[in-house]
Structure formats: C-alpha cells, structure tokens
Image (spheres, coloured by chain):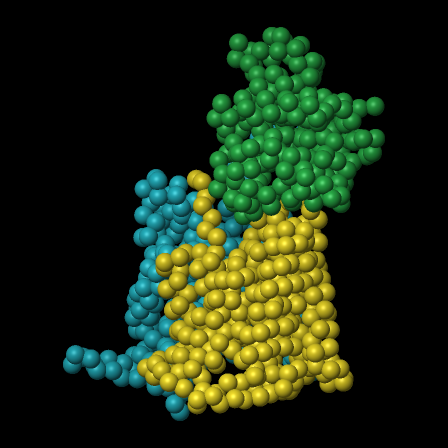
Amino acid sequence: MTRSQQRALGLAVSVAVVAVLMVWFGWIFPTRYNATDTRLVAQAFYIGVAAMGLNILTGYNGQVSIGHGAFFGVGAYTTALLMSHEYTYFGITFGHTSFVATLLPCAIVTFVVGALVGFPALRVKGLYLALVTLGLAVIFPDLATRFVQGTGGTSLVALTPTQVAAPSWFPSRLSAQDQWAYTMCFALAIVGVVGVWLIARSRFGRSLIAVRDHEAAASSVGIDLARTKVLAFALSAMYAGIAGSLSVLVVFNASADKVETFQNSIEFLVALVIGGTATVVGPLIGGFAVVYIDKWTKDAFPSKPVVSPATFGVALIVLMYVLPDGVVGGARRLFAWSRRTLRSRRASPAAPATPATPVST
Amino acid sequence: MSLLEVEQLTGGYGAVRVLYGLDFFVDAGEVVVILGANGAGKTTTLRALSGALDAKGHVRFDGRDVLGRRPEQVAAAGVAHVPQGRGTITDLTVEENLRLGAYTRRDRDVDGDIEGWYGVFPRLSERRRQLAGSMSGGEQQMLAIARALMARPKLVLLDEPSLGLAPIITQELFRTLSSLNREQGISMLVVEQNASLALGIAHRGYVLETGSIVVSGSADELSRNDDVRKAYLGF
Amino acid sequence: MALFFTQLLTGVQNGAVYASLAIALVLIFRTTGILNFAQGEMALFSTYLLWKFTDIGFAVWLAIVLTMAVSFVGGALIERVVIRPVEHSSPLVIVIVTIGLFLAINSLAQFFFGSGQRAVPTFYPEKVWHPGGVIIYSDTLVLVGVLVVECLLLYLLLQRTKLGLAFRGVSGNADSSRLLGVPVGRILMLGWGLAAAVGALAGAMAIPTTAGLVPSSMQQILVFSFAAAAIGGFDSVFGAVVGGMIVGVADALTIQYVHRLQGITLIVPFGLILLVLLFRPAGLFGTTRVERV
C-alpha cells in the first residue's frame, strides 16, 4: 500500500469512527440508559467543555490557571438567575427566560470577565499567575454569598423542575429532563471541539503557541502579546462559563460553596492534563476520565467512603507516571511505536538495523 | 598505562546514536584535544565519560572501570568536567562556587587552595563576594575552570572553553590552561571547534567527524595535515 | 488604640503560622521548582501523628520532636518514591502528582486517625496579660519565638554548612552540581524532608490555638501560606517570613476595621499578591532571573 493510499484509508477510518460516535452518543445513548447514567455522561461532557477552555489558555498559551471554577460559577449563576428571576433595569424587564436564551448572555458575560482578568494577568507570570487565579477561585464563593440572594439566605440558586425541563419544540423522543440536559451538553461539547479545532488551525492558534514557547521571538515577528494573551483568557473563560450553564441543567442549581469552586478548578486542570494538553479532543476525553475514575473509586469502597479520595489520588499519580502526555499523547506514542515495529518486521529479517542519523551535539 | 583509556565508546540519546566506537587515550601530564565541527559528537563524548549519559564500551580511568558509574562517583574518582557554557551556579557567589568545587574533598586545605586560585585568577579575587551570574563570560569561564580544579582532579574535561568568548579573552584563557598544564602537570582533555587555539597548547589530538575518529596524531602532525588545515584551520 | 494592638498581635500570631508553612513551600520550590499542593496535608498528617503521640502518653515537647523526625523521613521518602519518577516531566504533570498526594494524604489521615475533632496540647503554659488594655497571649510570643529560632537554624544550615551549600548549589544548577560530585538525589530528598519537618512544626504551632484538629484544618492555612510565599518571592525563606507577617496582619486588621469587606476578607491576601507582583514580578525578595534571548 502506498503512502497516499495509507493516508486515505486513515482518513476514511477516522471519519467512520467519528460518525459512529456521533450517532451513538447523539441519538442512541440518551434513550438506552437510565437517568443517572445519562446525567453522568452529561457531566463528563460539560467538564470536557470547561477543560477545552482551559486548554486554550494553559495548553496552547501556557498560562496556568487554577481558578476556572470561578468562571464556571459565573456562567452557572448567569443562567440560573436569568431563568429563575426577573430583573428591571432602565425600564426594561427581562428574566424567566428559557435555557437556550441564557446561553448568549452567559457567553458574553464570562468572555468579558475573562478579559478583565486577563489584563492584570499580563503582568504576572508562571507560578505567580497560578496563585493569582487560585485567588479567584477562593474569593468567588465569598463574592457570591455577598451579592447573590439565593434560597434561604445562602448563595444557592435552585431551579424548579418546570424551569429545567425540555422546551416544547424539542423532539419528544428525547424530552425527559435528563435527556434534554444530556443533549444540550453533547451538542455544546461538539460545538466546543469544533471551535478549538478551528482555533488550533488558525493564525490565532499559532500565535497562542508562539507566545507560549517564546514571547520575545513572538513579539519580534509582530504578534501582539497583550491581545493574544487577553483573548486567550477571555475565550477560556467563555468555555468555562458555558460549562457552568450546562451544569445548571444537570444539577438543577447554581452554587458556590468554598470547597466546590476550588475543587472544580482542580478538576478542569486534571481533566486537561489526563486527556492531553494542546490537543483538540484530549480535554473531552479527560472529562470522561475524571468523571468515571471518580465514580469507580467511590463504588470500589462503598463501606469506607474516606478511602475513595485516596484511591482517586493514587490513580492520578499512577496516570501521570504512565501517561505524562495524556491519553492522546499516549495513544500517539502507541501508534508510532506500532507503525515502527510493523515497518521493521516487514523489512527483510536478515537485514541489520540501520543506525539512526546523528543529530547535533 | 595511560591515565584515561577509551575503547569502542558507543552511545547517544535514546534511539539516536551519536558515537560509533571511539578509541582514544590521555597520558598523565598531557593536553589532548578533540577537534570537530558542530554535531560531531564532542559534547556527547565528554558527557559519556563523566557519566551523564548511557554509553557502551570500555573506559578505564587510573586503572579503574568508570563507564556506567554515576556522575558523583566519576567526580569522586578524580575527573572534573567543565561543561559547555561554563555551568557556573549563578545564584552563588564566586567564593561559594569555588568552595562547592571542593565538595568531594575531605582535607583541610580547601581555604588555602581558594586563595591559591585567587592568585592565578586575580579577577576572581576582586569579585569573590559577587554573584557568579553577574560576571562576564570570560570571568565565568575562569571561575568554572578554577572550580573544577578545586577538586584537585587528575583529569580535567573541558567542553568548548572558547565558546561565546571574545578572541582576546580566549587567548588569555588558553595561555592560562597551558601554564596550568606545564607548571602543575594537570592533564586535560579539551574538546574544541577552535582548532588553532586548541592545537597551540596540545600535545596530541584527534579529529571527530559524525561520531567517529577520522584523524589522530601529535599536535604538530595535525597542524600540518592538509585535510585538517582545510577543514578546521581555514588554509 | 488597645484594640488596634490586640488585633495587630493576632495578625502577628497568624502570620507566624502562615510564615512557617510558607517556609516549607519555599524549600520545596527551591528543591523541585514546583508548587507543592500537598504541603498542607503533609502538615495535617504530621499534626495527627503529634496528637497520637500525646494521646499515647508522650510529653508534648518530645512528641513534637518525634513528629518532626518522622515527618523528615516521610518527606524524603515521598520525594524518592513519588516525585522522583516524574522529576523531568513538565511542571503541570508534577503539580497533578502533588494534587494526587493532597487527596491521598488527607484521606489516609482520616483513615488512620478518624475524622472526629482532636485536641492537640501545647508545650508551654497558656497565659494572658493585659497591659494597658491590650490583650497579649503567651501563644503569640511562643509562636514568634519558635519562628525566629527556626529561621536562625535554617540560615545557619543553608549559609554556613557544606550541606547547605550543596543544597543551594543543587537549587541553582543541579547539572553543574552533579558534575562537581554533589549527590543530587540525596539533596532532593533532604529538601523535601526538611520541608516536611518544617511543615510538621507549623502544624504543631497552628492547631493548638485553633478550634481543634479536623481534616480540613490546614486548607485555609495553605491558601494563606501560598499568598505569603508569593509575596515574599518563592525562593526566599526570609521573604516567606515577611510575606507571612504581611498577610497575617493585613487580614487581621481588615477583619476588624474594614467592614465593607465583611465576608470577603480573603480578597486581602490575593489583592496583596497582585499588588506586590505588579511592582516586583518576582516577589519582594525573590531573585529575578534575567534571561538572555
């Protein structure tokens, strides 16, 4: 088989695999499984979306953030508040909207907040940036408690079953609440993947990488450092915000307790690294990994709930030993290794292995 | 028996082979030079000797097998390696760098030696409390050499000492190296791209090309060798 | 006025706690170059150990010494067994490993010692003085005293011993140090062991003055200690102390005097980090690395 034939075959196989996955996840899955499982996968999808956003900032642009739980929270609150309350400003009344109608406002709000954070972040690098973003995750719950009037005086904004139910125009085959939530998560995850794919291939994507690898060189070829870095923050915040919106459909509320925002931030980072930084589908795979490892460690020791975080922690550590470049990276290495072994096996067994060409020393 | 005997040294980085069976030796009191262009394998050779990377073959130093030993053990055996780019510890002062050079020693003459090296390198003496990172390239190179010598090694490996330094500085540097060898009998294995400087202080030399030794002989012979002259001496 | 000084002293006392954990963070940063998310939980485990020792019947001061020794060994082992395999991976990977450690150690502490509240005793007498209306606790004096002694000992170790010089050499340039014969692996273990022992001391100092030892005791302290280390510059022990004091005092005074920030006083340490970093990107006492392009 020639090289181009191989490539065509590879492309055909990939397209077929993607098509099968789309049909399975989009059409078949939601009707086959019970509500709990469906919600679990929906959660995997929206964590994947948040991780995709973090990928734009941390994977492609090298700015480490452990505060994206805050943007997630802003998105969740925007959606929850718009759906459950009515507001009147400058004589205009709005509120009690449908879920879909909250998506655009949520995207805009979190984009703007992300940009606002991105500006001061310009002055802070590496480790210190990570700490400042940690600050975001830690302060957000306090801000929510201070400024949000939720149920019973807490910062929890709960939604009624009617509010989270599927709208009338949605196909009746998927109209159960969990199916509706799942479909939205799936659909937006696909949109998210396409978005990241387009970014990665674009000039903007290349600037992201250039700025990550060598700022001085990047600016010397005319890349606007500030614009690139702030835009990366804004886009990643937007993704996290949409993920937060989606979470409202799955857990029926928006909340921000102290531990949760920090945990979410860590979860997104873990999903990103497990899946594979600077890869298009890695973060999505990471979302699944995080959700399912969590489930398995909880199910493994039903009588001793204290032990499950330990198993999760150990699982994380082991994963980093085995797959330091994530699932996608590991898959690529496996692929390359199998290609090499197949190729050398196909060569005559009597021929000696040729030495590789020396590189500069 | 030579101070350093290397037979069939083979190695590289992971799947990439760089050295293909090198044979060379250094006698006590000699300055031996390994010439070669970029990518020939000069740095890799030294790193294989000091234990910083995996290699196969035989390396006997002072009668003992050292191939495969950890860098700490090779250093303790009496081999000092001045890496490419000098490798001074920029966060420590000049004096602290020198003192760290004597890490493997257990005797009481460390302070005396430090003063001695200040005598040989007066500029270091002026800057003894200065952070190493704030000095010029030439001064850092002198510090790196003095630091390596603090260990009272039997053999010093020098990786491209002239790299990145102005011509006047490199002249002074090589004069110092030469006098250290002549007056104190310190054996040196110098890896260099700058052939004329290196051959000027060497007793013998080898030429390394893509991982193999292609020419060997006395410094005189190499300077007169037509191929060497054309490729490395520019005439 | 008396209230101001009382609050100031509270801030200083808290600051001493943040400073001591921050010192541990700085030691790890100098050794391995990363943010150790597990530092608080390692200190938590050590403090549980301390409680167990006192529960068995050891005198408190002896229990503290034992705990520090065990923690030193534990920290060194963690470096050798858990961190060493990923030493050369990207910093993100190493951070995820410390996150895994965070979860595992917290969980193991609860597994071995139970999740209930434990009381950890002090080794000094609890006294209160009221000169001129200002309230002074013996806790404050002891904590600050311990911090000062700790810093002095660390200074002597790092600046005046051969081992300390080797540690600073490895922190600066591990490859060069290796070529000089310094056993880099063992120095890394030393760094982590020292950090663990310092963290154990931090826990021993912090917990007796709080509500009691519970699994979440160290988490807020960790956040403040991160802030302290960042303000001081991550590679400076002295910076960690100054940072700790700034965070402790600013927090205490804000709680007392700035009522508009009621409930969101956490803004203070992070606002401070941002402020400091805007003017000095490497922290107050950190070394700025100038890189030639």
**Residue C160, image quadrant:** bottom right
Instruction: From the image, state the color of chain B.
Output: green
Residue at the spot x=69%, y=17% of the render?
A: B204
Please identify the residue farthest to the bottom as the structure is shown.
A152
Residue at the spot x=36%, y=46% of the render?
A: A203
Please state which of residues B12 and B102 is positioned toward the viewer in this rendering: B102
Residue at the spot x=67%, y=74% of the render?
A: C46
Tally of numbered discs: 0
Please identify the residue farthest to the left as the structure is shown.
A91
- The cyan-coloured chain is labelled A
Q: Position of residue B114 (x, y in %)?
A: 64, 39
Q: Position of residue A190 (x, y in %)?
A: 43, 61
Placement of A313 over or under A338, stated as above or below? below
**Residue C219, image quadrant:** bottom right
Task: From the viewer's perspective, tell me whether residue B235 is left or right of residue A83.
Answer: right
Residue A256 seen from this side: no
Image quarter (top left, top right, bottom left or bottom right) of the N terminus of chain B: top right
Residue A211 seen from this side: yes
Q: Position of residue C188 (x, y in %)?
A: 66, 55
Task: From the viewer's perspective, tell me whether residue A265 is left or right of residue C198.
Answer: left
Please state which of residues A270 and B87 is positioned toward the viewer in this rendering: B87
**Residue B41, image quadrant:** top right
Residue at the spot x=74%, y=31% of the render?
A: B154
Q: Position of residue A104 (x, y in %)?
A: 30, 68
Please state which of residues C35 and B90 is positioned toward the viewer in this rendering: B90
Instruction: From the image, state the color of chain C.
Output: yellow
